[in-house]
């Protein structure tokens, strides 16, 4: 039986995910070929990752370390022994026509990750996470260029053998929005661990299983029974490569299935391909074709006993915990704390700054001014890693009233970013230095002397006349006097 | 009739080294950079590896000259070298008979003097059988002693590369050259023992205890048994003591071996699809159709048979009945051998229960041929070392005696074998 | 005679899984042979279960680059290539 009809009634969306993330290691999982960007196809290949006869896999230590870090971060168990298995199937992107993966003894078991959607927090169960090798990249040529009509396939094995972590969740999601929030949180955690790069093309791939279940199947806790979950027809949606894409694809799929059900039509159990450019999912093959992967142990790789690595390996403070600490320790609001922990690099940068200056001032400068200017220029904060002291100097200049905040942002910061110059040099070149007190005083007296009408207006109670005089003083001092101070000095003179 | 080589070469080794001045034949499933490596199969008829196997690098560094790639049963699957795509090699020690398999070309090259030494591979007896049939010495090392990097896989949890030579001491010297851990093969381990293998060929067997497993002698051909018993007497005369031992687990060894070997083969040979190397069919079709045609054209019958049976043994619904059970049998066999080797120094048996077949005689009954491996396969399942050394003749046909040692017990079996020369 | 006799259908199914095209006479021959061979394998039912012995573990290599093949070497043995890539049949 491949399909079923569902009676009218409340319908619940049930989603489970299989997330594949590429791990950031120098070399591939089973050989010493580079995982870096290649200039040509088939440039980073060797007998092992090309699957040449006689080649043998040897496990990359860094991939195992990354897996243990991930396990620790999601509160998963690392079992006493973990081993690799062969998953046997034929496809041109698979050099050996089997994939070395993990089957019933994965390196991480039973973890969880909390997601927050609309203020509500919920743990999502992560059933397992395991290591495996990435296949090569295919190009479908001829016909319409699409996978269905192509005449032939061109293959580049540069990607083959890149270490992957496959993370499998329980069918705990109840909406596409939750999926998006989860994936965003997961990406953030993985980046914090230093094992993942969201910017890298193809570093995240998601297969989602979605089914629509009748709410009547839920018990008093709103929990759906395992039978209900397993008996519902599910579609597998493939070709999702971002958290935003996941939400769109699943929202489309959810609507498609609900529409079908509400019209009394049959929902096929099948695999569908997400077409991002058209915004739809397209049927691939019916899932009725049972896949027999004939899993058996990979005898070329001795088992791993790395449970004790969990204690020994250090992981950094994770985003959520860091956000909460920032709120408390630096008295920041939710929004500021969020911006300042958006990446580990930003958070580290902020904390260095906050250790020297007023955390509030540092927060404003990093969260609002600096990040804003960086985003506008499409720059990453890591590009300023070596210039931390210059940013600190800029904040110091403002903190000690040497320059105005306005000048600091509009002139100094922008020039620092655009021309790479240091703050002091810019201040000097642009003459932004704080005008000395004597100069300001003289300008205040001059403004009063030169503008008797404004003085008279002020004497008669027109408070706004002061602004005109402030403007005159600012002009005279080339804008570098502090307006607040000028205002005070004028009043002091005029009120006498 | 092909001679011992599929491809002849003249690849000089380094100037100095323990094998300087020696010629060596390399079985054609061991990768040699720039030199065609066919595995005795039409599938790889034109395949030229871009890299050397680790053992080839070591042999080269030791100064040996590679004179050819030796004939073999296709992909190592066979006991007679008759499944090779170039046809069989005649047995120089018994013309008109098979040289054994699957390293038949390697043994024949040494027996005929076409090479001083040879490397073969042994998955279920493929070094020891041809050594016995051709009247030369062959060693299957402990699993993990010799690197398999570059050995084109048939059954990766069972196979090892090993030496063939006219004498025990020459085979031992070659073993010294190729043995030792390799960071490209994660299953290799260092031999914890001391002293070279060559030094162990000292002909001394005084005080050694030899166990003779009943199950490995009782089914043997009468002439083979007589030659075997005569050799045993010779060892006893030199101070060894023999005792009968019981190895009940070997009753299931052939079946366990074939299930595991065929299952692994079905996966190890999946890569041959005509995309990256090897034969490609001219027929049209999508990837499923094209692959099926290519593989049908490129593989011989025995290879197809084992791939299909192996696929069956691993498939859904049969995995537990066949593959899982075979692994269980393997654990039992390991335990059984450990038990008897705790009581005696070495085990002795005829290498093969029969003398060399006539060419063409054995081809119609695959099962009968599988059963001829009964004496050799248990050793691969147990991951142990074994040597076959000439032990006379029956009706003018060579007979070999097999000695099996504990893990990393190569020195002991080399020592005992050298006492028979 | 084993309980589940091997049928032609089984042989064709397995040939499909293994991507090996078989002629009709091969199917016939294999069906007969497999029957006999699998029958012999029945003896494995009698095997007792024993504890697994300790094995080699934790064989790892450092995350350091090693020489790769050049693209020419990689493509050298390929029957068909195009623009530096391996050419294979379409996948539909």
Image (spheres, coloured by chain):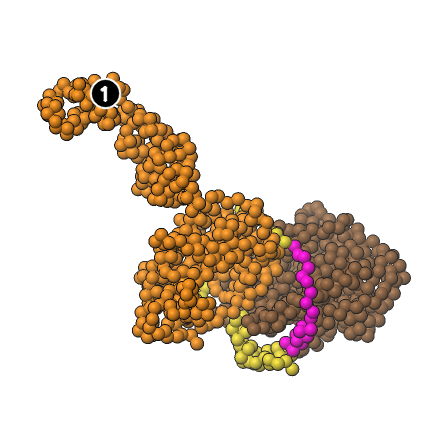
Chain colours: A orange, B brown, C yellow
Image quarter of residue B369: bottom right
Q: Please tell me whether residue A124 belongs to the stretch shown in magenta.
A: no
Seen as rendered, the residue at the extreme front is A220
According to the image, label 1 marks what residue? A440
Q: State the extent of the magenta-drawn residues as a range.
A: C38-56
Res B349 visible: yes
> Percent from the top left, x then y, of residue B90?
71, 69
Q: Image check: B132 left or right of B233? A: left
Q: Image check: A287 left or right of B79? A: left
- How many C-alpha atoms fall within 10 Å of the one at disc 1: few (<14), some, or many (≥20)? many
A367 or B352: nearer the eye?
Answer: A367
Quadrant position of the N terminus of chain B in the picture: bottom right
Image quarter of residue A491: top left
> Percent from the top left, x then y, of residue C92?
42, 68
> Percent from the top left, x then y, of residue A391?
37, 32
Q: Which residue is painted at 37% across and 42% down in the image?
A: A337
Residue B357 lies, with reference to residue A78, above or below; the image says below
Q: Image check: A438 left or right of A97? A: left
Q: Which residue is painted at 56% across and 59% down in the image?
A: A105
Quadrant position of the C terminus of chain B in the picture: bottom right
Q: Which residue is painted at 44% across and 57% down in the image?
A: A124
B205 or A228: nearer the eye?
Answer: A228
> Percent from the top left, x then y, of residue B117?
72, 57
- Give the secondary structure at mark 1: helix
Q: Chain of mark 1?
A: A
B2 or A26: nearer the eye?
Answer: A26
Q: Which residue is painted at 46% across and 70% down in the image?
A: A227
Q: Please tell me whether residue C42 belongs to the stretch shown in magenta.
A: yes
For the image, the number of numbered tags is 1
């Amino acid at each position: 039986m491949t399909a079923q009809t569902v009676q009218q009634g409340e319908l619940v969306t049930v989603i489970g995910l299989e997330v594949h993330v590429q791990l950031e290691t120098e070399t591939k999982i089973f050989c010493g070929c580079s995982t870096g960007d290649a200039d040509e196809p088939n440039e980073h290949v060797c007998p092992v990752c090309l699957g040449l006869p006689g080649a043998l896999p040897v496990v990359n230590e860094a991939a195992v370390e990354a897996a243990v870090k991930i396990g620790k971060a999601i509160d998963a168990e690392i079992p006493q022994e973990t081993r690799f298995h062969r998953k046997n199937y034929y496809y041109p992107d698979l050099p050996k026509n089997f994939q070395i993966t993990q089957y019933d003894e994965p390196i991480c078991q039973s973890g969880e990750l909390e997601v927050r959607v609309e203020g509500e927090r919920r743990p999502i169960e992560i059933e397992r996470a395991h290591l495996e090798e990435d296949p090569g990249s295919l190009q479908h040529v001829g016909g319409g260029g699409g996978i269905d009509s192509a005449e032939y396939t061109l293959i580049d094995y540069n990607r083959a053998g890149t270490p992957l972590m496959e993370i499998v969740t329980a069918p705990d999601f109840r909406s596409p929005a939750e999926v998006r929030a989860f994936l965003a949180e997961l990406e953030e955690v993985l980046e914090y661990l230093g094992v993942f790069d969201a910017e890298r093309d193809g570093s995240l791939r998601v297969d989602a299983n979605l089914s629509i279940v009748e709410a009547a199947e839920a018990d008093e806790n709103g929990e759906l029974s395992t039978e209900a979950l397993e008996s519902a027809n599910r579609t597998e949606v493939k070709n999702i490569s971002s958290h935003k894409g996941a939400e769109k694809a699943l929202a489309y799929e959810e609507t498609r299935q609900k529409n079908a059900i509400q019209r009394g039509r049959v929902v096929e159990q099948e695999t569908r391909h997400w077409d991002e450019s058209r915004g739809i999912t397209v049927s691939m093959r019916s899932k009725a074709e049972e896949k027999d992967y004939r899993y058996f142990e990979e005898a070329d790789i001795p088992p791993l006993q790395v449970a004790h690595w969990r204690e020994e390996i250090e992981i950094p403070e994770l985003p959520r915990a860091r956000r909460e600490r920032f709120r408390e320790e630096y008295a920041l609001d939710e929004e500021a704390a969020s911006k300042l922990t958006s990446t580990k690099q930003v958070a580290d940068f902020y904390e260095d700054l906050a250790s020297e200056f007023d955390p509030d001032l540092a927060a404003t400068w990093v969260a609002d001014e600096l990040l804003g200017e960086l985003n506008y220029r499409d720059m990453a904060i890591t590009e300023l890693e070596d210039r931390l002291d210059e940013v600190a100097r800029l904040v110091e200049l403002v903190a000690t009233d040497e320059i105005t905040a306005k000048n600091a942002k509009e002139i100094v910061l922008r020039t620092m970013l655009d021309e790479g110059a240091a703050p002091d040099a810019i201040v000097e070149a642009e003459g932004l230095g704080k005008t000395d007190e004597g100069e300001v005083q003289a300008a205040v007296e001059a403004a009063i002397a030169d503008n008797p009408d404004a003085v008279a207006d002020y004497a008669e109670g027109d408070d706004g006349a002061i602004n005109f005089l402030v403007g005159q003083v600012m002009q005279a001092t080339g804008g570098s006097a502090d307006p607040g101070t000028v205002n005070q000095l004028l009043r002091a003179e005029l009120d006498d | 009739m092909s001679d011992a080589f599929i491809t002849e070469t003249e690849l000089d080794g380094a100037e100095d080294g323990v094998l300087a001045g020696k010629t060596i034949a390399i079985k054609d499933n061991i990768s040699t950079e720039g030199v065609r490596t066919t595995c005795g199969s039409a599938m790889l008829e034109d395949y030229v590896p871009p890299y050397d196997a680790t053992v080839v690098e070591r042999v080269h560094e030791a100064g040996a000259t590679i004179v050819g790639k030796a004939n073999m049963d296709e992909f190592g699957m066979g006991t007679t070298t008759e499944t090779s795509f170039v046809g069989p090699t005649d047995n120089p020690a018994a013309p008109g008979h098979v040289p054994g398999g699957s390293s038949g070309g390697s043994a024949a090259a040494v027996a005929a003097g076409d090479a001083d030494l040879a490397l073969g591979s042994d998955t279920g007896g493929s070094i020891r059988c041809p050594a016995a049939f051709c009247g030369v010495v062959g060693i299957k090392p402990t699993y993990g002693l010799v690197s398999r990097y570059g050995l084109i896989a048939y059954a990766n949890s069972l196979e090892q590369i090993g030496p063939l030579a006219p004498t025990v001491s020459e085979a031992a010297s070659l073993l010294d050259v190729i043995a030792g851990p390799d960071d490209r093969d994660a299953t290799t381990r260092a031999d914890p023992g001391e002293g070279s293998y060559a030094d162990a060929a000292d002909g001394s067997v005084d005080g050694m205890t030899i166990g003779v497993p009943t199950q490995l002698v009782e089914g043997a051909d009468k002439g083979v048994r007589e030659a075997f018993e005569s050799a045993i007497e010779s060892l006893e005369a030199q101070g060894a003591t023999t005792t009968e031992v019981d190895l009940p687990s070997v009753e299931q060894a052939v079946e366990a071996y074939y299930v595991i070997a065929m299952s692994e083969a079905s996966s190890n040979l999946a890569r041959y699809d005509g995309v990256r190397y090897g034969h490609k069919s001219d027929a049209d079709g999508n990837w499923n159709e094209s692959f099926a045609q290519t593989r049908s054209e490129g593989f011989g019958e025995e290879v197809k048979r084992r791939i299909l049976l192996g696929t069956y043994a691993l498939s859904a619904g049969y995995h537990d009945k066949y593959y899982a059970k075979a692994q269980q049998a393997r654990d039992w066999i390991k335990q059984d051998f450990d038990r008897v080797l705790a009581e005696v120094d070495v085990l002795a048996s005829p290498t093969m229960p029969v003398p060399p077949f006539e060419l063409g005689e054995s081809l119609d009954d695959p099962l009968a041929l599988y059963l001829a491996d009964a004496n050799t396969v248990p050793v691969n399942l147990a991951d142990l070392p074994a040597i076959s050394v000439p032990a006379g003749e029956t009706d003018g046909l060579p007979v070999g005696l097999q000695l099996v040692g504990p893990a990393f017990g190569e020195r002991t079996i080399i020592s005992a074998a050298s006492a028979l020369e | 005679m084993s309980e589940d006799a091997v049928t032609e259908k089984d042989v064709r199914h397995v040939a499909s899984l293994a991507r090996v095209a078989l002629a009709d006479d091969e199917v016939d021959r294999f069906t007969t042979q497999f029957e006999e061979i699998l029958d012999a394998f029945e003896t494995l039912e009698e095997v007792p279960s024993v504890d697994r012995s300790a094995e080699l573990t934790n064989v790892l290599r450092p995350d350091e680059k090693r020489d790769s093949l050049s693209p020419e070497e990689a493509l050298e043995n390929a029957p068909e290539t195009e623009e530096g890539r391996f050419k294979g049949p379409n996948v539909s």
